[in-house]
Amino acid sequence: MKTESPITPGLAARRRLPGSAVAALVVVGLLWAVAAASPLFFERAAKIRLEERLRPPAANHPFGTDDLGRDLFARVIVATPISLTIGLTAAAVSLCVGFAVGGIAGYFGGAIDLALSRLIEVFLCFPVLFLLMALAAFLPPTPVAVVLAIGLTTWPGDARYARAEVLKVKDLDSTRAARAAGASTPRILVRHLLPSVLPPLLVSAAFGVAWAILAEAALSFLGIGIPPEIPSWGNIMAEGRTLFRVFPHNIFYPGIFLAFTVLAINIMGDGLRDTLDPKMSKKV
């Protein structure tokens, strides 16, 4: 009989994040501050001035202008909440579906575990990007559709991770006591298993947010993600790709925002992993 949880949330909370993770957390916080201020730039981002098209970066246009004379700085700022929100919500969808499938498989075991595990493996056989593109092509080009497309194609990884964590903690004394007291299965999953498996799942979710932001940018760049009338880092870069050799600023600045965001979230995820699971950091 197991008497200890593999991860003690209270102890993990008292551990300090590495300095690099703290710096990454500050960067992510600044990005959300930029996202909160984005409504101030809506009008400037949508204003078309053909006489100022394809201007290089200058004092009045820090990032230059696009082929319609729109201020690129304002468009990148307005695109920030779109990319961040899609990344966060798509990762949340993936985490919820993954925990539901993986948690049920790990908790019940037997034939249910066998069937759900095979289902997870079938989804993992398909390249995620190709599956994502195929699903996105059949859905309407809206932010909600992009969130669902990303979330519903990336959940198998979270499900496999959740199953492994549930298998570790389902035989703890607290879980056995809840079953003996007659607690329902949903209550045991939510009140007893979820708190124990949540820390490692949050680490997985942090990396999931970074992947979702990249996936949205890739879909929008290919023209099957966010529609052009809604600025996102991906479709801003798509609009400037034909002019890249002559006017690289159309791709450079949204690309820098995208790269630094994904890098900061990945570093933050590494810090969370090292904080919540010190044994993992020693293996790396």
Image: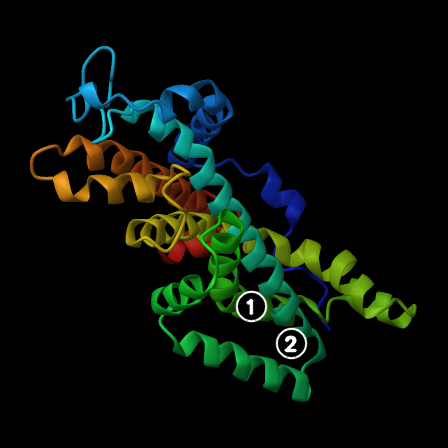
Give the percent coordinates (x, y) of residue 277: 51, 52
Residue 105 numbered tag: 2
Give the residue type at disc 2. Answer: Ala
Q: Amino acid at mark 1?
A: Ala
Q: Is residue 136 above or below residue 107?
A: above
Residue 24's label in the rendered image is none
Evaluate whether residue 275 shows in this view: no
The residue singled out by tag 1 in the image is: 159
The image shows residue 246 at horizontal and vertical percentages of 7, 34
Q: Earlier in the sequence, mark 2 or mark 1?
A: 2
Nearest the eye: 247 or 227: 227
Q: Is residue 275 left or right of residue 238?
A: right
CB within 8 Å, label 2 to label 1: yes
| Depth order, front residue of 283/269 | 269
User: Disc 2 on helix, strand or loop?
Assistant: helix
Percent from the top left, x then y, of residue 218? 32, 52
Which residue shows up at 22% across the image and 23% down it?
Answer: 50
Crowd band around label 2 with a 10 angstrom C-alpha radius: few (<14), some (14–19), many (20+): many
Secondary structure at numbered mark 1 = helix
Pick the quarter of the image with the N terminus: bottom right
Q: Tag 1: Cα neighbours inside 10 Å, few (<14), some, or many (≥20)?
A: many
